[in-house]
Amino acid sequence: MIAETRRIDLATRLRRISEILDELLPDAEASGAAMHRVTAIALECLDRNVIPQAVFALVDAVRKNPFWMRGYLFLAIIYRAASATQEAVATRQTGTKMCRTVRRFLIAQISRQTIGGAGTRAILSRLLDRMAIRMAMMKRYDDILRHQLALTLVGAGQFEEALLWLTEGDVEHAPMRWQ
């Protein structure tokens, strides 16, 4: 009975998180239709209590599109619910690194567009607005993943590392300090 409740809670939680992310970050995913199908497949698998199949679908999707931040978030939540703390931590760390990679790429693109001055002022303005929106979305995903990572680390008793992930702005090398 407890396992049944946990499964329902996990599927319901992921479904609700998906709805919230759709509201908060409506245009966040570049390949929206395919990734929504993967999300639906994973949720259906969780409803049927086939957790390994849900994980496989999400891992496969993240491998095909390493910039799908929602996939990292869902995988980490499933791993944490399954008490696979190391996998949850690794997934969240990979997700935060990918967020930073996208943000660095966008900063480089913005710099190149403003310096190059490609096109008319209206086109340049539109391009910069879209990039700024994408940057804000990546920042939100980064914040969500770092917060979840810190909670997972606290649950695993790694308080100092959790504090580093919560308090530092750029924590790309934070785990190295504790090794």
Image (cartoon, grey):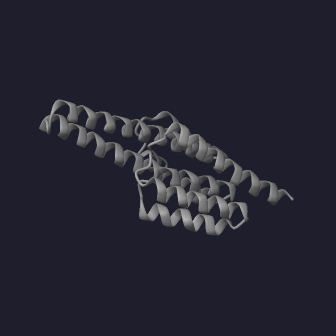
Residue found farthest to the right: 1
- Answer left or right for 33 relative to 107: right
Q: Residue at x 57, y 59 (%)?
A: 87
Q: Which image quadrant for residue 20? A: top right
Compare residues 122 and 83 and report the one nearer the observer: 122
What residue is rendered at 62% in x and 58% in y?
Answer: 79
Q: Is residue 172 left or right of residue 2?
A: left
Residue 177 in the image: state x and y as whole percent: 45, 46
Image location (x, y in percent) of residue 13 = 68, 48
Q: Kindly tell me whether residue 72 is visible in this rendering.
A: yes
Compare residues 142 and 49 and report the one nearer the observer. Answer: 49
Residue nearest the viewer, comparing 97 with 62 = 62
| Percent x, y of residue 68 | 45, 54
Please tell me whether residue 120 is drawn above or below residue 98 in the rendered image. Answer: above
Q: Residue at coordinates 64% horizontally, 50% vertically from top-left?
A: 14
Q: Residue at x 71, y 50 (%)?
A: 12
Instruction: Pick the residue in front: 86 or 135.
Output: 135
Q: How many marks?
A: 0
**Rendered view: 159 above or below 42:** above
Task: Judge whether residue 160 can be spotted in this image.
Answer: no
Give the quadrant of the N terminus: bottom right
- Tell me where residue 136 sits by quadrant: top left
Task: Provide residue 129's location: percent of width, then percent of height.
Answer: 31, 33
